[in-house]
């Protein structure tokens, strides 16, 4: 396979959006069965175009309208935002938005683009949003030797598999979640979109609590031992370890060869508690 | 408990089937009261609850919450003020109704600023915590059902099934402890902090919380609800504030002092002027001792000091004649000549005794007023030294008063925690050599009265002062009601009048 060449994008993207992008399922997903009125219409989309031009507060009357827009502007990146209390559309630049050339960040305005009315900003609120987990390979740089930063290979992709299985198990068994969409993010990781009705309404506090529940690794470059466990360990941790154990030998001992040299096994020893 | 038609509802109210209205001694105050109520009752209910909350505040600092001493004192106060104190009391309707209405009235008064909201929230939480913990297991369950907190206790079978997981997930719970205690199945949103920290077993979107932690959850729930309600109330305040009958009452509540107002003197003339120096050391609170000292040293006091100290002296029993003599003698020693005194200062003294102008009898300032309004500036000696003095200077002052170093430390700790009245109570205890002041200090004149009582073995000065703290006494005129019971508003008006007089003098 030829290496990826960003310069080819302007040529390739139109093909992508006409032939490959799953407009149908995408639109059906975001409409959520039409159960809530205007759920799709009040969703904010953002597009990143070439040369880093960023467009916020885009909304569409229907998935078909979205499809047409995508095929017209061929964005490099699409962000799905929250569902707001009103439809959004970009207001005029001169209404006090951050006027950075090339970065049109318009303020939200009400309804049809041709009305240019501004909603009283207090009334305009994000209402619901899926809970999204973003797993990035670079977070695992200190436990993979084969690649680093944006590179990935079949050896270190196992880490991604392990992460997905751990989180998915926790989401389903612990948090009682049913609807998750796992997607490749396009570069070096995966995203998980949790779409359960109740979860879309979760408060910021509850979201951060869920993330913390799932977190074990604390500390950055200046911490050697980033995980500290105490006895007895919580079932979440135990079950996650069970997942890891299935892959550990193949990944770590064989693939990454963590005990293959004095430097390598010193690193491992530094992570193990004294009394073992 | 459903009412299928409005007629039945009306009938139910008329028939006074009152137990249905308040099925529990405890509530979350979710529904505002809908009956009509007289202004008199409006006020007295609110004042009683305010007294209760102040007791809650004081007890919270003087005792560890939840100890027996704390609980028995709080229960005593609840009984005294006729609030619900025993969950099963039979004829509790009046107490529960009072609880309900007074809470909502105080919301109106205490939603108006961040500081007021925080104070109200804190005391209401403490009160709730006490009352919730006094419930038996069964009543607690019923209450939780009533407020739709779906904390269902898991049954024995399920608990046995999960026993291992529960003991491993819940810190401090080995298998036997798990078997003993009740566990509740709680939605994740209701147990956010326990969920976040992995301190409970989580399965299928629920947290399994031991009984021990339930009150925390309930309290969090209550706090969230009350906090939101206060914010909402604040937003609808403008319409309430336009009601002229309520606005002065509400204003007063949030600044109020609810004890005797020391305005009716039964002890006038019992103090002689030559006793004052000695009394200032023995029985004056520190603020008045400071003012007296400053007056003696400088032969003068500025306006704020004259008001605070002058009214205090009136409260301890100085007659108008005595007051005139007292101030004149001292001022003459300074730069003021007799003539000037008679023309200016004398007028204002007579004014504050109600013999001039509007002829309203001004009331001595309570601690709250002294602490919160009219802070002293350079050259002033009024205010509350615990509040307004720099801690270092306060320390020196206390040393000069021969307070022990350990006593000073305790006082400074309280000051650091902003418990100014408690610091003064500690000062009382240290200067009178008692362990427990025996009362809750709210007013400088109260300090004096109690001190005198203590020093004379309780025989002399009885508490003859008007104890109602209520605003309906005296005359019918709106003015005197305002002045005798709202030192805040009336004294401000008086201040402005007297300010005008100040301009008469070339120096302050």
Image (spheres, coloured by chain):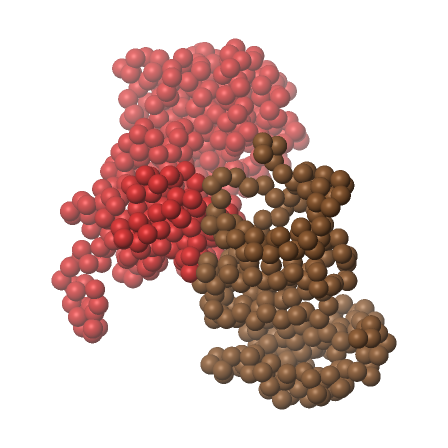
Q: How many marks?
A: 0
Residue drawn at x 19%, y 45% is: B88
Residue drawn at x 37%, y 21% is: B437
Q: Indicate whether B494 appears above or below B345.
A: below
Q: Indicate whether B255 appears above or below B406.
A: below
| Chain with colour red in the figure | B
Residue drawn at x 49%, y 31% is: B419
Of residues B293 and B384, the one drawn nearer to the viewer in this rendering: B384
Which quadrant of the view contains residue B233? bottom left
Quarter in which the C terminus of chain A is drawn: top right
Is B33 left or right of B321, judged from the image as shown?
left
Of residues A144 and B377, the one drawn nearer to the viewer in this rendering: A144
- Where residue B364 appears, as percent x and y from the top left, is 43, 31
Quarter in which the N terminus of chain A is drawn: bottom right
- Where residue B188 appears, as percent x and y from the top left, is 44, 57
> From where the camera sits, is residue B77 visible?
yes
- Where residue A85 appears, as percent x and y from the top left, is 55, 74
Of residues B46 and B507, the one drawn nearer to the viewer in this rendering: B46
Q: Residue furthest left?
A: B15
- Where residue B195 appears, as percent x and y from the top left, is 47, 51
| Chain with colour brown in the figure | A
> From where the camera sits, is residue B348 visible?
no
Residue drawn at x 73%, y 83% is: A16
């Amino acid at each position: 396979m030829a290496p990826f060449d960003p310069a080819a994008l302007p040529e390739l993207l139109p093909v992508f959006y006409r032939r490959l992008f799953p407009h149908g399922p995408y639109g059906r997903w975001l409409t959520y069965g039409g159960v809530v009125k205007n759920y799709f219409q009040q969703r904010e989309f953002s597009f990143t175009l070439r040369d880093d031009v960023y467009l916020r507060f885009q909304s569409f009357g229907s998935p078909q309208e979205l499809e047409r827009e995508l095929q017209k502007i061929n964005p490099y990146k699409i962000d799905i935002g929250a569902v707001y209390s009103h439809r959004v559309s970009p207001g005029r630049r001169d209404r006090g938005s951050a006027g950075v050339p090339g970065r049109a960040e318009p303020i939200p305005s009400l309804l049809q683009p041709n009305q240019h009315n501004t909603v009283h900003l207090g009334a305009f609120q994000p209402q619901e949003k899926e809970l999204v987990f973003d797993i990035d390979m670079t977070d695992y740089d200190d436990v993979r030797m084969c690649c680093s930063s944006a590179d990935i290979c079949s050896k270190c992709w196992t880490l991604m598999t392990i992460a997905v299985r751990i989180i998915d198990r926790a989401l389903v068994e612990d948090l009682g979640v049913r609807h998750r969409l796992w997607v490749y993010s396009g570069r070096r990781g995966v995203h998980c979109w949790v779409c359960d009705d109740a979860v879309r309404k979760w408060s910021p506090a509850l979201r951060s609590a869920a993330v913390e529940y799932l977190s074990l690794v604390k500390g950055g470059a200046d911490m050697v031992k980033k995980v500290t466990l105490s006895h007895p360990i919580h079932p979440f941790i135990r079950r996650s370890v069970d997942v890891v154990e299935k892959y550990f030998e193949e990944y770590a001992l064989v693939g990454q060869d963590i005990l293959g040299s004095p430097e390598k096994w010193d690193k491992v020893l530094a992570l193990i508690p004294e009394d073992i | 408990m459903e009412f299928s038609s409005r007629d039945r509802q009306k009938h139910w109210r008329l028939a006074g089937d009152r137990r249905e209205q308040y099925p529990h001694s405890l509530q979350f105050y979710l529904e505002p009261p809908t009956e009509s109520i007289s202004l008199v009752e409006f006020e007295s209910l609110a004042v009683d609850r305010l007294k209760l909350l102040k007791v809650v505040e004081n007890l919270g600092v003087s005792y560890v919450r939840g100890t027996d001493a704390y609980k028995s004192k709080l229960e005593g106060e609840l009984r005294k003020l006729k609030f619900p104190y025993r969950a099963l009391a039979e004829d509790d309707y009046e107490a529960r109704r009072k609880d309900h209405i007074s809470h909502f009235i105080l919301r109106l008064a205490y939603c108006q600023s961040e500081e007021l909201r925080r104070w109200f929230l804190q005391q209401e939480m403490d009160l709730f915590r006490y009352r919730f913990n006094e419930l038996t297991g069964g009543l607690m369950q019923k209450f939780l059902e009533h407020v739709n907190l779906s904390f269902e206790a898991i049954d024995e079978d399920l608990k046995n099934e999960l026993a291992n997981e529960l003991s491993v997930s819940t810190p401090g719970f080995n298998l036997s402890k798990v078997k003993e205690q009740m566990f509740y199945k709680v939605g994740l949103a209701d147990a956010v902090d326990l969920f976040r920290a992995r301190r409970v077993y989580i399965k299928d979107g629920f947290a399994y919380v031991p009984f021990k932690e339930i009150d925390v959850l309930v309290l969090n729930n209550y706090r969230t609800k009350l906090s939101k309600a206060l914010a909402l109330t604040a937003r609808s305040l403008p319409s309430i504030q336009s009601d002229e009958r309520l606005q002065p009452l509400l204003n007063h509540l949030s600044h109020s002092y609810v004890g005797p107002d020391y305005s009716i003197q039964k002890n006038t003339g019992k103090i002689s002027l030559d006793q004052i120096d000695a009394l200032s050391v023995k029985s004056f609170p520190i603020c008045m001792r400071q003012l007296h000292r400053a007056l003696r040293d400088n032969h003068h006091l500025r306006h704020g000091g004259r008001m605070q100290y002058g009214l205090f002296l009136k409260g301890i029993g100085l007659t108008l004649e005595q007051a005139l003599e007292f101030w004149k003698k001292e001022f003459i020693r300074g730069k003021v000549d007799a003539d000037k005194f008679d023309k200016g200062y004398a007028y204002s003294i007579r004014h504050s005794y109600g013999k001039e102008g509007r002829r309203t009898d001004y009331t001595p300032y309570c601690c709250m007023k002294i602490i919160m309004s009219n802070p002293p500036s350079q050259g002033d000696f009024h205010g509350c030294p615990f509040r307004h003095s720099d801690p270092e200077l306060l320390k020196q002052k206390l040393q000069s008063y021969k307070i022990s170093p350990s006593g000073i430390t305790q006082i400074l700790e309280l000051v650091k925690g902003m418990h100014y009245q408690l610091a003064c109570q500690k000062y009382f205890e240290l200067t009178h050599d008692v362990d427990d002041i025996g009362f809750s200090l709210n007013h400088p004149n109260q300090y004096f009265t109690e001190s005198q009582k203590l020093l004379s073995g309780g025989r002399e000065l009885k508490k003859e002062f008007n104890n109602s703290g209520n605003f309906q006494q005296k005359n019918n005129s709106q003015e005197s009601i305002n002045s005798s019971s709202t030192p805040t508003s009336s004294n401000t008006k008086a201040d402005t009048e007297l300010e005008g007089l100040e301009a008469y003098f070339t120096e302050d």
